[in-house]
Amino acid sequence: MKQRAAASKSSSAKPKLNFFSDTVSELKKVTWLSRREIIYLSGIVLLVTLVVGVILALVDFGFTNLIAWGFLNPTP
């Protein structure tokens, strides 16, 4: 019984500041991308974002003109 109490005290006595050292040790295990891969993938993300933005702008422009032509300018 005393051994269990001693074991639980030693495991709970771990300081909370070990969180940061544990985080650093886990980050050292990560396989990071190379600089070239980061630049390439960032370029793809920017290109796709730009293309989708242009498509959405054109769809918005088209719907705006459609609504304006259909509802705001009724023919007599």
Image: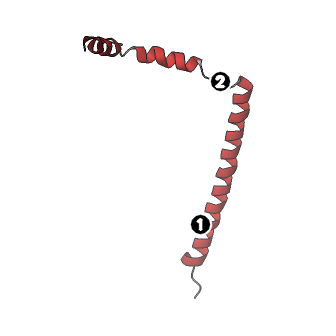
Front of the two marks 2 and 1: 2
> Which amino acid does the dot numbered 2 rest on?
Trp
Q: Is mark 1 on a helix, strand or loop?
A: helix
Which of these two is toward me, 15 or 62? 15
Q: Which numbered circle lies on residue 32? A: 2
Q: Which numbered circle lies on residue 38? A: none
- The location of residue 40, given as percent across then percent down, is 74, 33
Image quarter of the C terminus: bottom right
- Pointer 1: what residue? 64
Image quarter of the N terminus: top left
Which of these two is toward me, 61 or 10? 10
Which of these two is toward me, 26 or 7? 7
Q: Is residue 68 above or below residue 12?
A: below
Q: Which residue is drawn at 59% across and 19% down?
A: 29
- The location of residue 68, given as percent across then percent down, is 58, 72
The image quadrant of residue 44 is top right
Q: Residue at x 63, y 56 (%)?
A: 56
Q: Is residue 67 above or below residue 5?
A: below
Q: Residue at x 65, y 45 (%)?
A: 49
The image quadrant of residue 28 is top right
- The location of residue 32, given as percent across then percent down, is 65, 23
Mark 2 / mark 1, whichever is N-terminal = 2
In the rendered structure, the answer to whether residue 21 lies left or right of residue 49 reads: left
Q: In this view, does 48 lie above or below 27?
A: below
